[in-house]
Image (tube, grey):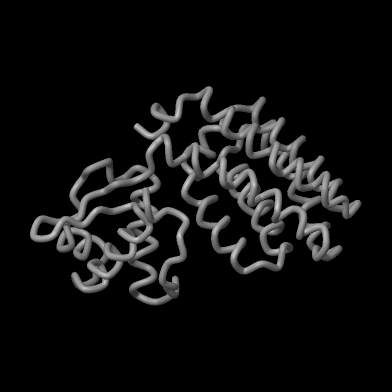
Amino acid sequence: MDGLGVQKEVTDKYSLRGRVFNRIREDILSGKYRQNEELKETSIGNELGVSRTPVREALRQLELEGLVNIIPNKGAYVTGITPKDIHDIYMVRSYLEGLCARWACENITEEKIEELDEIVYLFEFHAKKEHIEQLLELDNKFHEIIYEASESKILVHVLSDFHHYVERVRKVSLSSTSRAMKCNVEHTALLEAIKLRDADKAEALAHEHMMNSIKNISEHGIENILK
């Protein structure tokens, strides 16, 4: 996916175009639309209750992200996320998450640290209960807080997108109670390093967390998850 992760045109998620864009992207990433499936402007417009124009604009932007391939005089087709894309995203994230954790050590507030403490506590509770949706939500929030604490708009933008791109495989990974509990142990260690403002340790732990994640996902078989 040549366009994955590159700077893209900003779309207001609350505008009509933004809502259509986010809905189609979500449907692609969730697997509703399969690899090489044609995305018909009229059908999607009817489903979403909009004209073809915002659908066409959304498809063009999705092509910039590498999720759609538009063939002139033929149509738009799903490119989606491939196993190699998943692996590449985690490898890139492993370094960027480390940098993000380092910067978070410098900027995070006590209020945000308290939020992270609460997330770690709730994560353990829901992991024991195997509440997958709650775990996914808490994992999202944990990382989002650290992204914001980095005070880097660039990192927030890139990492938030990457985090969303792999949501499907993250959900499968967190469905394993053992991995969910280990994930929380890793979150806890990272949080303790951030509390101590130990940037070197926080960076190393964030990097290791991503490497452990891709190892776990690979054991499940990325190809099987994306089917």
**Residue at (46%, 65%) from the top-left corner?**
7
x and y percentages locating residue 34 in the rendered image:
27, 41
Viewer-nearest residue: 125 or 146: 146
Q: Is residue 167 left or right of residue 72?
A: right
Seen in the image, is 122 located left or right of residue 2? right
Q: Quadrant of the C terminus?
A: top left
Query: Which is nearer the eye, 210 or 141?
Result: 210
**In the rendered view, does 35 fall on the left or right side of 134?**
left
Residue furthest top as drawn: 219
Residue at figure coordinates x 79%, y 47% from the top left: 202
Task: Please give the count of numbered marks on the rendered protein.
Answer: 0
**Residue at image x 38%, y 39%?**
82
- Between 205 and 32, the one lying in front of the other is 205
Residue 178 position by quadrant: top right
Find residue 200 and report its horizontal and vertical position in percent.
Answer: 82, 47
* Residue 176, position as x, y percentages in the image: 59, 27
